[in-house]
Amino acid sequence: MEVQNIMEVATKDVLTISEDELVTTAITKMYEHNHRDIVILTKNRKKYGMLSTVDLIKMKKEGFDFDCSISSIPIRHIETITKKATVLDALSMIKSFNCPICVVDEGNDLCGFVSYHDIVSSIDPSVMLERRMVGEFLIAAEPKKASQESSLCDILGMLDQRIYDCVILTDDENRSVGIITTKDVVKFFQHNTDMKQKAKEFMVQPLLTISYSTSIKEALSFITDKHFKRLIIADDNGNVIGQITQEDLLAKIYSRWASIMKSSHNELEEINRILNEKASEYELMSVTDSLTSIYNRGKFEVELHKEIHRVTRYKTDMFSLVFFDIDNFKRINDTYGHITGDKVLKIITGLLKESLRLTDVFARWGGEEFAIIMSHTSLEEASYVAEKLRKKIEQQHIEEVGTVTCSFGVSEFIHGDSIQSLMLRVDNYMYEAKKQGKNRVVTSL
């Protein structure tokens, strides 16, 4: 097998914008071209950046003004590769499913844009696509769901992480009736939509699903014909049981079936080696918060579900849940800037990682909020640990900022709790700590 040149698989018509232009202009371009991402051209053309819908959502939640220049906001820089490189070169270089590569010429001018999906799609074991069912490759976490009566603001809050790019909307009988995606969010921003309005007025309906037993080949044809980014998968009764994006589907195919390639040419053996190495990297990256290097919200929800299942099965066991929030974090960002705010987040998570057990699940819930699952731990023991963590944070001097404090909520799992009831109780305790003056641990109302 001859390895393809990178330009054979790259997208050549790339949506771009200068860093001197406004964020609102970028939103308009993304809306007009029906894109979720736009490549940013810097003045010296030595680096390229990317602005995505997820970035816009985070900016909206943090109070950024979209009428500012792109150069004034935090930008994700993306790697470049020469147009003379091969697909194999790009595969070795690409860092994650969500990190594409810009293809450049000798003068570093942009020639194209290539994603992980573009690369693995060029190495196609067609027999496997015919015989495997799409249900075999479902992601572990269920799709995010919300009532169609929810506000757009609530829906936006569920779309601020790259692992969730859509929300399934349900009716009063909990039937899945519509969907809102990150692409819809671009339209909301373009039209300055009032985020207090109900989601049902803007959802895409009816919700198109495919069966669990659909073949990979049929699923890929469906997603291509409909110009969808993801598949919503239903069981034999029509109940939504999962979702998977086109990129994740292809990535899981090649991760799980890389051994098929071993009998091919030397180039395929080298591709197989790289895919196996990257599979572990991608698995870790998919559950890790990129800023703090602790678990992300998706991993936390999976682990919390497992822990509740464990203690429900073995009724003699227990665990506790801790939520904490950095006090006055918005003031830190507003006073010292987001770079300093990010430094504060990293210092605090680093401090706490040193004090927690290997069995504890420590995750960033979102923004400046964090969660800890403490297995085999009573309320009294968890409260003691939370107080130690609170004091450790308070005693840490952070350069430029000084003293930073946190407010904690702690609760033990009560048999009969659901994920929602437990999290709501702990969340209420944390906000009670805020009401009582911050910098404290609350275990009851």
Image (spheres, rainbow, N blue to C red):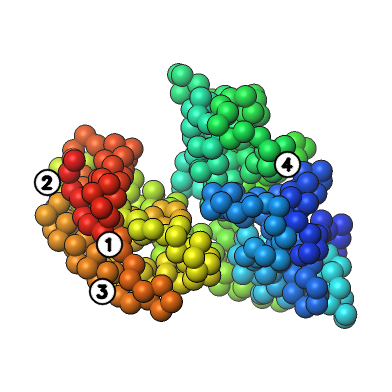
Badge 4: residue crowd in 10 Å (few <14, some 14–19, many ≥20): some
First in residue order: circle 4 vs circle 2 = 4
Q: Amino acid at mark 1?
A: Asp
Residue carrying label 4? 190
**Element type at mark 2:** loop
Q: Which mark is residue 28?
A: none
Mark whose residue sits in front, 3 or 1: 3
Which quadrant holds the N terminus? Answer: bottom right
Q: Is residue 129 left or right of residue 287?
A: right
Q: Is residue 369 visible?
A: yes
State the separation of the CA atoms marked 2 and 3: 37 Å
Q: Is residue 236 visible?
A: no
Q: Is residue 186 left or right of residue 10?
A: left
**Element type at mark 4:** helix
Badge 2: residue crowd in 10 Å (few <14, some 14–19, many ≥20): few
Q: Amino acid at mark 2?
A: Thr
Residue carrying label 2? 316
First in residue order: circle 4 vs circle 1 = 4
First in residue order: circle 4 vs circle 3 = 4
Identified at 42% across, 69% down, the residue is 344
Residue carrying label 3? 395
Q: Which mark is residue 360?
A: 1
Badge 1: residue crowd in 10 Å (few <14, some 14–19, many ≥20): some
